[in-house]
Image (cartoon, rainbow, N blue to C red):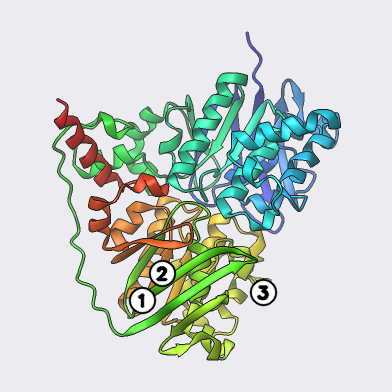
């Protein structure tokens, strides 16, 4: 009988000062060539499991670990320092945490040097892995100039250069636009065909991976394993339990459920029958007021390269504006420029009829809340409670209520950096909401969230919007845009190329040109309409 590549037996992980384990009695095996999807709610221990599998724990663990993990027949703890990482490659949830060098090519070369590759062979190997992820044109660039999605691709390239037998991907598409996500999955598929690499994929958005995976592991909120098997079986047997636990269902299954289609439900939209009817929640007419932001011939350039060129743009009080576009298109730069975090090279920007350069900084950011793409960039204190209380007039009762709303009351005394990525995101959003800003800007607010906490976050944001807060949301999630946004800006190469209501954008725009995709319902209707034409 073929020996498993990886064996996890009765794994229990408990962090220091925690009374309950993060991972509870976890046991499973991984066979050579498996492609496994690991799903679970935010905070269920998925990333903790990653640190156990790649040897970071128990060496770097502030806590206790019991049970055993074997790789290719040997206990992981028996591997010499660094050796297991040549066998088990990991692309972490936050790619910036694993970079060691300053430039793209040096980051790849660093791993190859540790692998003791001959310098004569490095040139072609660097080109090979950068070509795999579409970054060959950025080879000489500084890493800090890459977009979030490009950093994710670089982290993947650096790991692929080591040629690991097991590749762990921790939320690999979270920062990628839909087109880049599909490209990444296609890259991994080709890699599997060439090398038969074994995959463990941790994701919330699972639709991209359906053509690749052959097995699914489901974690509960307490870090225990409650399902090991076929995803289609899990969806059709346990759909209610999955949603209660915050685990996303495939888009097709969600549409089938909304249309009250009898089971079994398919996992892909093309297998849904024609003529499904969905309950839609009519959007209320948006009552907008005076202009809160006004952009006049604003340009941002570095040296001679123009990164943003916005001739005119007005945002009115009470709007819920979505900014979208492919990775590196300038979405985040635009949001930072219109909020004063980035000064334009030329032109003017006004906030509340006053030029940004004339605002007192402290007064400006009492009116504007900005949630960064990387939540750690805005943490200032050593506790979750302290983050919500910092610089606020809110009393203890209000802070406690905010913690309960974002499901972090139990983590009140923890350092923000010890939270899971999803928990960090909820905290970063809450720190801005408690200050009741007039303008709230959120860069990928649902990054790393399960389905339940996504609903919690969006409900909080919507309530603040209903109280008069103007919201700008940067996102690739077109379903969120369809549900919440009153207006959509599509940014491409530093310019606003589309500006309209969501429904109009879906009808008139080929979103694939901009690296985007239609919301699930719109994609279903378009696919079935096209099928009817050729029937």
Residue beneath disc 3: 381
Q: Which element carries disc 1, helix, strand or loop?
A: strand
- Position of 312 with respect to 103 (left or right) is left
Residues 56 and 157: in front is: 157
- The residue where tag 2 is placed is 472
Q: Quadrant of the C terminus?
A: top left
Residue shown at 44%/74% (left/top)? 440
Q: Which residue appears at 57% of the width and 74% of the height?
A: 342
Q: Report x, y in % for residue 213.
A: 48, 28
Q: Position of residue 132 (x, y in %)?
A: 60, 33
> Residue shown at 66%/62% (left/top)?
417
| Residues at marks 1 and 2, CA–CA distance in whole angstroms | 9 Å
In the image, taking residue 87 as reference, residue 27 lies left or right, namely left
User: Is residue 356 visible from the viewing direction of this image?
Assistant: yes
Q: Local crowd at mark 3 within 10 Å, few (<14), some, or many (≥20)?
A: some
Q: Nearer the viewer, residue 470 or 281?
A: 470
Pointer 2 local density, CA inside 10 Å: few below 14, some 14–19, many at least 20:
many
* Of the pair 234 and 463, the residue shown nearer to us: 463
Residue 284 vertical position relative to residue 97 in the rendered view, above or below: below
Residue 246: give x, y in percent of width and height.
42, 49
Left or right: 239 as drawn, with respect to 426: left
Q: Which mark is residue 315?
A: 1
Q: Nearer the viewer, mark 1 or mark 2?
A: 1
Query: Which of pointers 1 and 3 lies earlier in the amino acid sequence?
Result: 1
x and y percentages locating residue 89 in the rendered image: 69, 35
Mark before the other along the chain sequence, 1 or 2: 1
Q: Looking at this view, is 425 or 325 the one in front?
A: 325
Tell me the mark number nearer the camera, choosing from 3 and 2: 2
């Amino acid at each position: 009988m073929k020996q498993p590549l990886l064996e996890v037996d009765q794994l229990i992980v408990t962090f220091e000062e925690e009374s309950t384990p993060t991972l509870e009695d976890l046991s499973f095996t991984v066979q050579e060539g498996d492609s496994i999807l690991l799903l679970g709610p935010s905070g269920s221990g998925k990333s903790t499991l990653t640190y156990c599998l790649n040897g970071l724990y128990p060496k770097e663990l502030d806590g206790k670990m019991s049970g055993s993990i074997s790789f290719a027949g040997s206990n992981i703890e028996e591997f010499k320092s660094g050796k297991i990482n040549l066998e088990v490659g990991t692309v972490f949830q936050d790619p910036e945490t694993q970079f060691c060098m300053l430039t793209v090519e040096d980051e790849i070369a660093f791993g190859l040097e540790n692998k003791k590759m001959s310098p004569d062979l490095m040139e072609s190997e660097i080109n090979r892995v950068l070509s795999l992820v579409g970054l060959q044109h950025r080879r000489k660039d500084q890493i800090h100039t890459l977009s979030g999605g490009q950093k994710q691709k670089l982290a993947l390239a650096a790991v692929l250069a080591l040629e690991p037998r097991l590749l762990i991907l921790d939320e690999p598409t979270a920062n990628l636009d839909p087109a880049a996500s599909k490209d990444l999955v296609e890259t991994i598929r080709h890699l599997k065909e060439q090398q038969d690499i074994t995959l463990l994929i941790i994701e919330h958005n699972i639709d991209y991976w359906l053509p690749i995976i052959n097995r699914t592991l489901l974690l509960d909120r307490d870090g225990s394993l409650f399902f090991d098997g076929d995803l289609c079986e899990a969806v059709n047997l346990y759909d209610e339990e999955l949603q209660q636990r915050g685990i996303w269902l495939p888009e097709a299954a969600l549409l089938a459920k909304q249309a009250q289609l009898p089971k079994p439900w398919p996992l892909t939209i093309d297998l849904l029958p024609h003529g499904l009817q969905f309950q839609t929640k009519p959007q209320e007419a948006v009552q907008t007021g005076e202009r809160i932001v006004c952009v006049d011939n604003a340009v941002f350039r570095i040296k001679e390269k123009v990164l943003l060129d916005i001739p005119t743009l007005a945002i009115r009080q009470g709007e819920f504006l979505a900014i979208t576009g492919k990775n590196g298109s300038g979405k985040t730069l635009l949001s930072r420029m219109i909020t004063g975090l980035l000064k334009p090279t030329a032109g003017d920007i006004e906030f509340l009829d006053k030029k940004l350069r004339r605002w007192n900084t402290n007064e400006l950011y009492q009116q504007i809340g900005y949630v960064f793409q990387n939540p750690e960039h805005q943490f200032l204190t050593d506790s979750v409670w302290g983050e919500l209380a910092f610089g606020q007039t809110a009393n203890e009762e209000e802070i406690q209520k905010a913690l309960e709303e974002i499901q972090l009351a139990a983590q009140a005394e923890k350092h923000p950096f010890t939270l899971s990525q999803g928990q960090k995101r909820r905290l970063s959003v809450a720190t801005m909401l408690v200050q009741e800003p007039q303008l709230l800007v959120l860069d990928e607010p649902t990054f790393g969230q399960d389905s339940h906490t996504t609903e919690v976050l969006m409900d909080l944001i919507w309530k603040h919007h209903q109280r008069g807060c103007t919201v700008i949301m940067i996102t690739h999630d077109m379903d969120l845009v369809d549900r919440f946004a009153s207006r959509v800006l599509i940014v491409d190469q530093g310019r606003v190329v589309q500006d309209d209501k969501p429904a109009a954008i879906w009808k008139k725009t080929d979103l694939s040109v901009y690296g985007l995709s239609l919301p699930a319902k719109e994609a279903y209707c378009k696919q079935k309409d096209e099928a009817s034409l050729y029937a």
